[in-house]
Image (cartoon, rainbow, N blue to C red):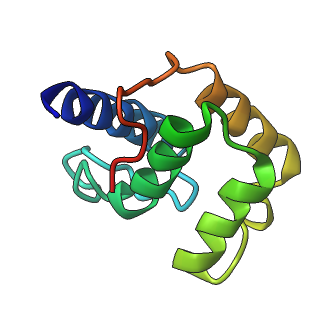
Amino acid sequence: MREDMQVWRSTIKNVLELLNELDPYGLTPGQPDGAPQDEYDLEAKPIAQRLINDGVITNAQVDAIWLKWFDEPLNEVIGREATERFVDNLNSLPTPTTPSGDIS
């Protein structure tokens, strides 16, 4: 159980770092005049869950997550090419593995 939680925290941290770097809405998370560091945390969690469960995430899955939270797919916010690069970066993160699989 402890290893599962470490994988979960590490994966969310990595995904959140990529989301903050991408910063699709120009909120500058973690900066003095910006949004809180965890501004994209609600979006990071389902992305991390997909990476843990499946080992990869697709553009369509990221768009579906974004659609849920913002009523628009990510590719409409930042463009298809930028979304593809972001998904490539997500899929390049260290492969998260847990002994029991699903962490919800």
- What residue is shown at x 66% (from left), y 34% (from top)? 56
Q: Say left or right for 83 vs 9.
A: right
> Where residue 68 sits in the image (x, y, percent)?
58, 78
Number of numbered markers: 0
Q: Is residue 66 visible?
A: yes
At 68% from the left edge and 42% from the top edge, which residue is drawn? 57
State which quadrant residue 89 falls in. Answer: top right
- Up the image or down, 63 lies above or below 13; here it is below
User: In x, y percent, where is residue 93?
Assistant: 53, 21
Q: Residue furthest front?
A: 100
Q: Is residue 36 left or right of residue 82?
A: left
User: Residue reaching furthest bottom?
Assistant: 71
Q: Is residue 44 left or right of residue 85?
A: left
Q: Is residue 74 visible?
A: no
Q: Quadrant of the C terminus?
A: bottom left
Asked if residue 3 lies left or right of residue 61, the reply is: left
Front-most of 1 and 15?
Answer: 1
Residue 23 screen position, x and y as percent: 51, 49
Front residue of 101 and 13: 101
Q: Residue furthest right?
A: 80
Q: Can you say whether 63 is above or below 29 in the image?
A: below
* Residue at the (37%, 63%) spot, across then down: 42
Question: Where does the image place residue 100, in percent across and percent down from the top left?
Answer: 36, 35
* Residue at x 73% of width, y 69% of height: 73
